[in-house]
Image (spheres, rainbow, N blue to C red):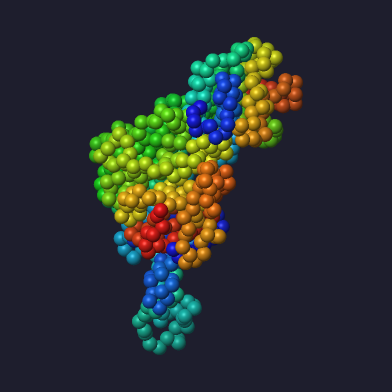
Amino acid sequence: MKKEEEDEKRDWSPAGLRSYQQALLRISLDKVQRSLGPRAPSLRRHVLIHNTLQQLQAAVRLAPAPALPPEPLFLGEEDFSLSTTIGSILRELDTSMGEMELPQNPVASPSLQNEMMPQADPVFLEALSSRYLGDSGLDDFFLDIDTSAVEKDSALPPPEPPRSLFCAPGSWEWNELDHIMEIILGS
Amino acid sequence: MPSVLLSQADIISTVEFNHTGELLATGDKGGRVVIFQREPESKNAPHSQGEYDVYSTFQSHEPEFDYLKSLEIEEKINKIKWLPQQNAAHSLLSTNDKTIKLWKITERDKRPEGYNLKDEEGKLKDLSTVTSLQVPVLKPMDLMVEVSPRRIFANGHTYHINSISVNSDCETYMSADDLRINLWHLAITDRSFNIVDIKPANMEDLTEVITASEFHPHHCNLFVYSSSKGSLRLCDMRAAALCDKHSKLFEEPEDPSNRSFFSEIISSVSDVKFSHSGRYMLTRDYLTVKVWDLNMEARPIETYQVHDYLRSKLCSLYESDCIFDKFECAWNGSDSVIMTGAYNNFFRMFDRNTKRDVTLEASRESSKPRAVLKPRRVCVGGKRRRDDISVDSLDFTKKILHTAWHPAENIIAIAATNNLYIFQDKVNSDMH
């Protein structure tokens, strides 16, 4: 980042920069999730957040990575495609004026929606699940996450209590997610 | 500056003077439209120098539910545009996210009296009591304002309508959503003509949306639309049926020293307005207002900083979503002064000739009727004068998104959340 952030007394060492970018990524993803609600999301806002995310991903890829195991979760673009999420939201916005078939929304059961998981797009969940249920093993999965952005970053304004995108395996939420995934993949 | 302050129950979402400035319409989040009328200046009561009073209130839009997509359609009025007055009635277009409506506003101040077959209450008379015939006459009555929906332009938009604009031909108008612009004939509701479509074949390739659009005030074939990437496209409807190729593209190259992750978001144009002369365009993005000359596409001819002190706060403004706020902008009648809103109920005016600017506040505390508005100042550290506000104590929930300027006089309407302020000024003495 440039001089515009100097008032916030940010640490611009490579680790500080990385943690800042991770925080922005987290904020951005949180925003995307939160915009899925009873009202049609603002397309402009989605597109702007999406474009910002792409820039963040590009920047983090270019920045020298400190000693870390394989790519952090958010940067595995092949698995985790925010484009897909935006795309699915956009497809749902199309009316039946002959433009598009509407996809079935499997996560429609009210009881599921009231659970801890935020009301997330099924394609989004599917993208996440491909990491969850992948070969890398759950322990490796958690090694990838840079928690310094969440725990120690005091330069940023206090974030909202994070709507957790990931659940501890074996937890109640984990089992719910598993259950949801079965429904999605089975439909 | 005498001011009129009126409260409304709901958050005001649009403000618009009609072409003479006699009427001022506001739309709110609850789908209501309130029209104010300027009282004629009276020698008997010199203090009520043409103040605005409520003229009519009506429910324009209702909330809807799209069962097919399980989505609510908000009743919030996004825009109101007046039609030029062609007879005794007034007409306006109001729109929410999906549906545009044409409303006709008429006055009734006389009623017929002296019917032969009916008595004064409207009951049929006993014919045996009728011994002679009379001609009914029109007698004055208390003014009644009647509003009726004359046209409903529905099902034209898949995405959210952000703008409507009446053509100078007074027969057509356009409506723009995030990806498309449609041309309508005012008398025809069952079809519209698509003139701009920026929807990509693959929605996942979408990187840019339409944010605002407007017809040229004099040339009925020209219109402009702005984008979320900060560009303006001037289109000529004579050139092609589908105006996907712009006639002119107005875009300012990015300043590399100011580049950040938020550069694109803050460059997104939230409003575009032609000058009354038709020679210039005014745009608003997150931090600036810019004046563009239609003859120069490479860069704006003037740039004014609205609140540059926010440049170092973009990250927290991003997190709070404030960075997505869409501020409007306005020209005065002679195109010499431009105005836009900001946070903390501040609004800013820039005099293009003297290059002076002023920050004013719309609040109950600072606006007693007939009080003079005091210029405000935001200090960014360093020397602080007595009445300065520091950047950190700005209230970002108090945003002035919607402002309007009377077409001829120095009268401005400012919407501050759910309050409407109308300021009138005889002399431009407040610029510093």
> Is residue A69 shown above or below A117?
above
| Image position, residue B94 (x, y; %) | 43, 52
Check the image and report above or below for A170 versus B75.
Answer: above
**Apparent side of residue B280 relative to residue A162 in the rendered image (left or right):** left
Q: Tell me what residue is drawn at x 53 percent, y 54 percent.
A: B387
Residue for point 64% across, 17% down: A144
- Above-or-below relation of B351 to B121: above
Residue at the farthest front position: B383
Count the marks. Answer: 0
Residue A29, horizontal then vertical, whole percent: 58, 29
The residue at 46%/81% (across/down) is B119
Asked if residue B44 is positioned above or below residue A109 in the image, the reply reads: below
Q: Position of residue B264 (x, y in %)?
A: 45, 32
The part of the image, by quadrant, that contains residue B197 is: top left
Residue B104 in sight from this viewpoint: no
Q: Residue at x 69, y 22 (%)?
A: A178
Residue B226 visible? The answer is yes
In the rendered image, residue B169, in percent from the top left (x then y), is placed at 27, 51
Q: In the depicted view, which residue is nearer to us: B361 or A103?
A: B361
| Of the pair B249 and B385, the residue shown nearer to us | B385
Q: Quadrant of residue A149?
A: top right
Q: Where's the N terminus of chain B, which quadrant?
A: bottom left
